[in-house]
Amino acid sequence: MAIDALLKSRPISHDLSERAVNKVIQVGYHDIQKLGGSSWEERTAVLRDGGYNRYREQGATSLGDLADLVNDKYDGDLNNLLKKAHNDRDETRQLIKEIKGLGDLGADLFFNNVQSVWPAMAPFIDRRSLQTADSIGIGTDLDAIYTDLGHDSVMMSQLANGFRIVNIAVGVFMVLGGISQFFPASMSSIIVGIYVILFGLIVGGLEFLPNVPDYVYRYASFLFSFLGRGAFYIFVGSIMLHDHVLRYIAGSIIGVIGLGYLALEFIPSIEPPSNMRETDQGWGAEQV
């Protein structure tokens, strides 16, 4: 997770940084001992192969510094950093920023993810994602959000991703819009309502699964790209636009979000987050 935060905090596209992280994991550098035993030239070559060209030399140096810090100061186990910080988030932030090249943005990325394995760091959502949560009505009270999640630090980590917040909101709007189809009831509106409710439960539920089942990728692969998910949201939103103000509101919001996802498909520097693309082999193997 420290490697993930370190590489992704550079001013580089998410696509390239994600590829670089996957390459680092693939060669086994998530093992701090193997990373520490690598040469600068070897790390540079790995980052180059992962497409991390612009910052490969700087990144190779930072990875080496990370390994030296963890090995020398924390006996090869970053969990000892948490102990040294006495489970305090502010102290942890100061210590994690001792990693050369890891600033405030990197620390936020680190906390977003590490709270799933360091529950003492929960609840945490970075500032940008918290603004997203506030804009769609979830609010900014982290303690209240954490309570609603049953004090589940893994779910809190998942929610820290802004796209997850948006998708959960879409799921809620779908369910509400589906329920509204029952009033007044007709055979066609009931059928549409049932489908929309099921769609909403699937869209929202996917954000809380630790691992997406393979059959979801197989039968609903369109959900794992900006283009496919955007088109799906527009479709669901459009079938809700009739006869009732709640349907118009929910359908319009879902449709606008769908249009936003379609636009993101054509912005090369933005890649779908991990919950909106097929799982990369080896992802999740990185150790703290």
Image (spheres, rainbow, N blue to C red):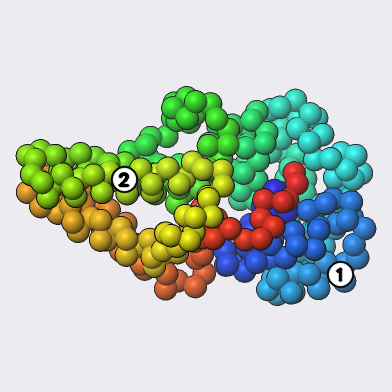
Q: Position of residue 95 (x, y in %)?
A: 76, 39
- Horizontal side of residue 32 vs 260, given as left or right: right
Q: Quadrant of residue 238?
A: bottom left
Q: Who's the residue at 91% across and 65% down the image?
A: 39
Give the residue number, with chain letter if any, for mark 2: 198
Label 1 to label 2: alpha-carbon separation: 49 Å
Residue contact between numbered discs 1 and 2, judged by CB atoms under 8 Å:
no
Secondary structure state at the residue bearing disc 1: helix
Q: Residue 264 location in percent, x, y?
A: 41, 66
Q: Nearer the viewer, residue 27 or 51?
A: 27
Q: Is residue 179 left or right of 138 when viewed as pictured?
A: left
Q: Between 246 and 36, which is closer to the camera in this rendering?
A: 246
Residue wearing tag 1:
42
Observer-nearest of 83 and 189 = 189
- Residue drawn at the location 81% of the way across and 57% of the way down: 29
Q: Is residue 219 above or below residue 209?
A: below
Quadrant of res 71: top right
Viewer can see residue 73: no
Q: Amino acid at mark 1?
A: Glu
> Going from the N terminus, do you reach mark 1 or mark 2 first?
1
